[in-house]
Amino acid sequence: MKKIAIITGASSGMGLEFALLTDKTFKSVDEIWLIARRYERLTELKDRISKPCLIISEDINDVNFINFYKKALKQEDVKVKLLINCAGYGIMGRAGREAIEVETGMIDTNCKALTAITNVTIPFMSKNSRIINLASSAGFMPQPYFAIYAATKAYVLSYSRALNIELKDKKIYVTAVCPGPVSTEFFSIAEKGSKQQWYKKYFMAKPEDVVKKALTDSINRKEISVYGLSMRGFRFAAKVIPHKVILNIINLISKEAKEEDI
């Protein structure tokens, strides 16, 4: 029976980095399943990985995907040692600016699809397996002009922490990764039509650094992985300072982006 790692959103950004580092870190994994829509990107990634890879070039929001995915797990006779849910996207700006399918699509991808994939995968996981869900520091509290994305990541964070408790008797451990700004193509999509907020460049992390810490924290069975002093400070502030105060500060420093949207 093959031991596999499964990575969604593997064609770029954090998913790509997780795939590369998983290949180097987990010697017991026999095969890596790469899931994303962009086939060409996945084939390029496959060539950079030493382990055998199964490319699944599908849209995880497609109504037929979950049935296809479940059948693949059964037919391949596998044990999933590592599930990494990276698929997701965010759009910044005033709520209602984007088409409704774009805004609700964030919920479908970041929450609904992640939950469905996780629930289908759990029965195929064995003792001492890991689930890593890509949440965000945006999930620590509401985020004006990033409202839907932050709400979806609050869901991922809450879901992951609860799931970690539920699965402990099976010795399956769940880690929610909560980075701040990361230097990937995420922001070229998220900030389309909006000017990047000036302060983000001071907190921008390298994806390989965030992923390295996430995998280490997962191995060490930590329920939350937060990279960098600034984001750990933000997490602490979100716990002790009334959210209304922080929300007003965010509103002020986001004023330039807000005015562009009017």
Image (spheres, rainbow, N blue to C red):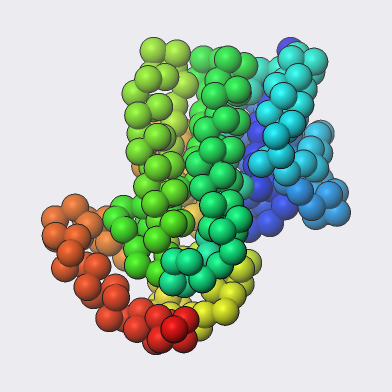
- For the N terminus, give its image quadrant: top right
Residue 36 in picture, x, y percent from top left: 73, 46
Vertical order, 55 against 18 (above or below)? above
Vertical order, 9 against 147 (above or below)? above
Residue 96 in picture, x, y percent from top left: 48, 66
Residue 52 as seen in the image, left or right of residue 132: right
Residue 184 as seen in the image, left or right of residue 3: left
Vertical order, 47 against 161 (above or below)? below
Number of callouts in the render? Answer: 0
Residue under the point 54% across and 52% down = 104
- For the C terminus, give its image quadrant: bottom left
Residue 248 in picture, x, y percent from top left: 22, 73
Q: Nearer the viewer, residue 181 or 29?
A: 181
Q: Quadrant of residue 164?
A: top left
Residue under the point 60% across and 55% down = 101
Q: Is residue 126 visible?
A: yes
Residue under the point 66% across and 48% down = 9
Vertical order, 97 against 126 (above or below)? below
Residue under the point 21% across and 67% down = 246
Q: Is residue 32 visible?
A: no
Q: Nearer the viewer, residue 219 or 69?
A: 69
Residue 233 in picture, x, y percent from top left: 25, 61
Q: Nearer the viewer, residue 31 or 259?
A: 259
Residue 135 as seen in the image, left or right of residue 241: right
Q: Quadrant of residue 187?
A: bottom right
